[in-house]
Amino acid sequence: MISDELKTLIHLLSKLPGLGPRSGKRVALHLLQNRTTTLPALTESLQIVSAKVKNCTTCGNLDSQNPCALCTDPRRDRSLICVVESVADLWALERTASYKGQYHVLGGVLSALDGVGPEDLGFSALFNRCRAGTVTEIIMALNATVEGQTTSHYLAERLKEIGIQHISSLARGVPVGGELDYLDEGTISAALLSRRDV
Amino acid sequence: MISDELKTLIHLLSKLPGLGPRSGKRVALHLLQNRTTTLPALTESLQIVSAKVKNCTTCGNLDSQNPCALCTDPRRDRSLICVVESVADLWALERTASYKGQYHVLGGVLSALDGVGPEDLGFSALFNRCRAGTVTEIIMALNATVEGQTTSHYLAERLKEIGIQHISSLARGVPVGGELDYLDEGTISAALLSRRDV
């Protein structure tokens, strides 16, 4: 009863993250109900983004200029590179407004299960940036998952080999507003180990 | 830190039903990560749907042909019209595969708060279909909300005036799998009033 064109659109929408078959239908109907406003605006925006927004060839960030605004910003510290898994993680760090160095987006993490090896990620680009000589510290800000930490260890070893002495990672501990009773043992152990003098 | 083009896309995505600022960002990043597959497929599908899928001028259903496939299907009973609020409701009824008449999509319900009056909805198109003479029964399948029921009563009065004798509405009662303890008083009262001999 639903026409093939509409079925295709619903199928594509329902495969987007956070959407399913039911919400795909809702979005498709919403777009058709707003066929003179939202629908053309979204189509045009998708075309513009597809044409203009590219990954920065230096750091992997998404921007309409290459190198990206973060790489070209003269106020940002070029001796510091923060390694993140994805652009979403870069945005999360930027939201804090407490980091003023450069970034490097890997675009994924090592995963034997998914067949992702070192050659699939932007490692060599990172090594080239480090060999240029301006970098003095690398901050590992990969997710605290098994794959993230494996990647972090692997990268740290390789970075030491090419002469980067100072490699750090985000602190582990009790999150702001966290209650001990609801935290896992690993986090509490890490917070105990890294305890600080008051 | 996010480029203007990308901000526009995230804004448009975050206004879609079921999405918000955070899921809008996720969808935008997902589309850019799949810029050679999902992104062009979605853009093309939106363009095709925008160009081809229109509201049927007879019943208001969405289809790539006009009159729509339901209106032109010779196996469907032309003496029966089921009045629904939206195309989503039409799809919900079609999923049951237990109705073989025609439909009429109002595209909304009467609402004094939102300023929706009888002239804003497809009432006159429905009256014209009824005046053609083949219709013997109208089934009111509007949502069981205050606005839906107000619209239902208003339409029933007008339809009687133009000579439709048989006007019915969906039964009220205990839903399949429903437990009395969790049902509201209104539903239980309606189920008691409409009780049936076993």
Image (cartoon, coloured by chain):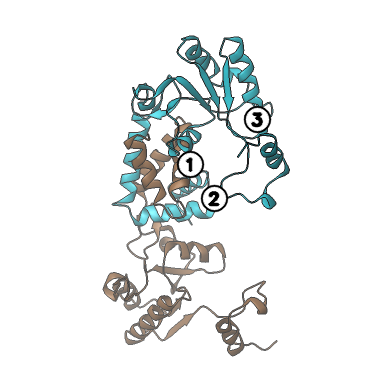
Chain colours: A brown, B cyan
Q: How many marks?
A: 3
Q: Amino acid at mark 2?
A: Gly
- Identify residue type, mark 3: Glu
**For numbered disc 1, what is the local secondary structure?**
helix
Q: Foreground mark, 2 or 3?
A: 3
Q: Which residue is mark 1?
A: A26
Q: Position of residue B4 (x, y in %)?
A: 46, 48
Asked whether, in this view, residue B134 is left or right of residue A4, the answer is: right
Whether residues under marks 2 and 1 lie with C-beta atoms below 8 angstroms apart, the answer is: no
Locate residue B158: give its quadrant.
Answer: top right
- Cα–Cα span, label 2 and label 1: 14 Å
Q: Is residue B182 left or right of residue A84?
A: right
The residue that appears at 55% across and 83% down in the rendered structure is A186
CA gap, disc 2 and disc 3:
27 Å
Q: Is residue B187 visible?
A: yes
- How far from the left and from the top, in percent, is residue A162? 32, 84
Kind of element beneath mark 3:
helix
Q: Circle 1: is it few (<14), some (14-19), or many (20+) Cα within 10 Å?
A: many
| Few, some or many residues within 10 Å of mark 2 (<14, 14–19, 20+) | some
Q: Are marks 2 and 1 on the same chain?
A: no
Q: Secondary structure at mark 2?
A: loop
- Where residue A115 appears, x then y in whole percent? 28, 72
